[in-house]
Image (tube, coloured by chain):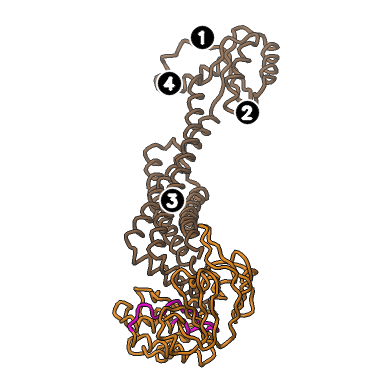
Chain colours: A brown, B orange
């Protein structure tokens, strides 16, 4: 009995999808496009976040010290720096070390710096890291107040801008995703409503013959599910191949940028997209049918 | 089979369609429902198949109170009632076979069952040669025969016919009435609302006359009207 009915559901859904081919194509197209934008936005947001946190973790404060401080004072200062809120790591860089680092970065032009060994103009310094990137500006202000500190440097300005950017990308991204999702649900609902409306006499006859609501509803729901799943699958395939080829290109051309390439994360995004297609299709058909079943 | 106790029906637009109706139809009866348009015949039919609920009173069909019936039980009530309408209500893009098969698909019949039952019921109504035709290719009488076949395919205990001969010529109407009598002889209760006075007068069945929402006459072996 149940098998016969299930066969009937699929046959009816397929017939309707074929009979209304244009509507099918239109709603599938909408789902594909919505999910493509949705998926690209999610990947964009994820990547911006990853790049931002990479930059954040490489962020440090350099505390330049006055010349001629005694060793005792240097040790004291280290303890005072550690006491500043948010500070986690403190490293001493002696002026000799600083010069060596500079020479190293000059490479084969290092002889330009020759002669400076006897009269090293570079100061001693501490490099300081904080627990979180947004603690940097506050910590820097505190460090400036310490005795024996000449100057405090960090990426002033850049960090704040980056954080603001990621914040906005996140908000607008989520908003765009929401709007697109709602639009897709409404479009599918309209599509299926048209197909229901065209068949409202038939639905009346079905109810007259003793069809249960679920019997009337199932073919339409299946129709929505098939549209949603197929649209979702197409979108997922396009995004998958598009993103993989983007990853390859970026890895070759810009090796210092680390994009999201963890398969687990990517599959999570793709799976969610497929799920979204399914939900949109099913929800759209359920919403539009309710009105016609009250006979 | 059908019992109504002090049934009134007032529609939301304040129209009082039925007023304090009490009536009892036994299993196996053949009953004509007559009266002018707007007398409440359609409302009565709708109450019996629970398309509408009464404003007051009790409706009992096949031993079940329709007021206490849950919405999800209504489909199972309707499977026990075969309905025939003046406008046939066939699905236009389905063939004669498919239209009748549809009633069986709804109750979950197998493909094999459908292939056996549909031709048999079509033979019974004399439509076996038109099995693959679409409703538009049929005459009115043939369409109504198909509708009757669909109404009886699930072996209903009751047939509600709402002016079934309204769109048919006199000869075809008589053919259809013979079919209904056949069905009635097998034990199916029939309640038929009609304006066809010649049919009612000739068949000498029970006649219930409605006027302005009240029963003005309920007579065994009656005629359409004592006024003409």
Location of residue A248 by image quarter: top left
Q: Chain of mark 1?
A: A
Height in image: A78 above or below B119?
A: above
Mark 2 / mark 1, whichever is N-terminal: 1
The residue located at (47%, 45%) in the rendering is A261
**Badge 4 element:** helix
- Residue B182 in percent (x, y) is at 46, 92
Mark closest to the chain's N terminus, 2 or 4: 4
Q: Of the numbered discs in the image, which one, if any, rests on residue A106?
A: 4
For residue A121, the mark is 1
**Disc 3 designates what residue?**
A186
**Residue A80 found in image quarter:** top right
Q: Secondary structure at mark 2?
A: loop
Please provide percent x and percent y for residue B200.
44, 85
User: Which region shows up in magenta?
Assistant: B150-169
| Discs 2/1, front | 2
- Residue B70 vs A105, above or below: the answer is below
């Amino acid at each position: 009995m149940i098998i016969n009915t299930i066969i009937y559901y699929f046959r009816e859904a397929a017939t309707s999808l074929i009979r209304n081919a244009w509507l099918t194509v239109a709603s599938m197209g909408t789902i594909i496009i919505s999910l493509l934008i949705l998926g690209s936005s999610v990947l964009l947001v994820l990547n911006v976040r990853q790049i931002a946190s990479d930059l954040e973790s490489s962020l440090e404060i350099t505390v330049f010290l006055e010349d001629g401080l005694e060793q005792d004072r240097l040790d004291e200062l280290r303890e005072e720096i550690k006491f500043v809120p948010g500070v986690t790591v403190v490293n001493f860089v002696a002026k000799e070390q600083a010069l060596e680092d500079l020479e190293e970065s000059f490479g084969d032009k290092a002889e330009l710096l020759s002669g400076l060994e006897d009269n090293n103009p570079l100061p001693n310094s501490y490099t300081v890291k904080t627990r979180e990137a947004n603690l940097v500006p506050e910590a820097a202000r505190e460090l400036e107040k310490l005795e024996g500190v000449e100057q405090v440097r960090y990426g002033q300005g850049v960090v704040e801008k980056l954080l603001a950017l990621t914040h906005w990308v996140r908000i607008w991204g989520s908003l765009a995703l929401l709007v697109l999702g709602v639009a897709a649900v409404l479009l599918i609902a309209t599509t299926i409503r048209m197909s229901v409306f065209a068949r409202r006499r038939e639905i009346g006859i079905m109810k007259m013959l003793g069809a249960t609501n679920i019997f009337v509803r199932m073919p339409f729901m299946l129709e929505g599910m098939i549209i949603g799943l197929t649209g979702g699958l197409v979108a997922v395939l396009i995004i998958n191949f598009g993103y993989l080829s983007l990853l390859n290109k970026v890895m070759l051309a810009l090796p210092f940028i680390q994009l999201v390439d963890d398969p687990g994360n990517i599959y999570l995004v793709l799976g969610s997209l497929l799920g979204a297609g399914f939900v949109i299709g099913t929800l759209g058909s359920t919403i539009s049918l309710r009105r016609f079943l009250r006979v | 089979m059908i019992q109504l106790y002090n049934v009134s029906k007032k529609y939301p637009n304040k129209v009082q369609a039925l007023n304090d109706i009490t009536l009892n139809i036994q299993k196996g009866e053949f009953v004509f429902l007559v009266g002018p348009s707007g007398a409440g015949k359609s409302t009565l039919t709708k109450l019996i198949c629970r398309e509408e609920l009464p404003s007051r009173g009790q409706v009992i069909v096949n031993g079940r109170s329709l007021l206490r019936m849950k919405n999800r039980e209504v489909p199972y009530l309707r499977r026990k009632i075969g309905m025939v309408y003046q406008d046939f209500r066939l699905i236009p893009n389905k063939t004669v076979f498919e239209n009748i098969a549809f009633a069986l698909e709804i109750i979950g019949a197998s493909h094999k069952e459908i292939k056996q039952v549909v031709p048999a019921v079509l033979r019974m109504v004399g439509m076996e040669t038109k099995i693959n035709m679409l409703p538009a290719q049929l005459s009115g009488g043939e369409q109504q025969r198909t509708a009757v076949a669909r109404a009886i395919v699930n072996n209903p205990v009751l047939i509600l016919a709402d002016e079934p001969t309204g769109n048919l010529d006199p000869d075809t109407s008589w053919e259809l009435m013979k079919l209904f009598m056949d069905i009635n002889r097998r034990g199916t209760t029939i309640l038929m609302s009609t304006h066809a006075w010649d049919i009612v007068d000739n068949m000498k069945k029970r006649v219930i006359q409605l006027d302005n929402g009240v029963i003005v006459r309920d007579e065994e072996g009656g005629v359409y009207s004592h006024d003409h």
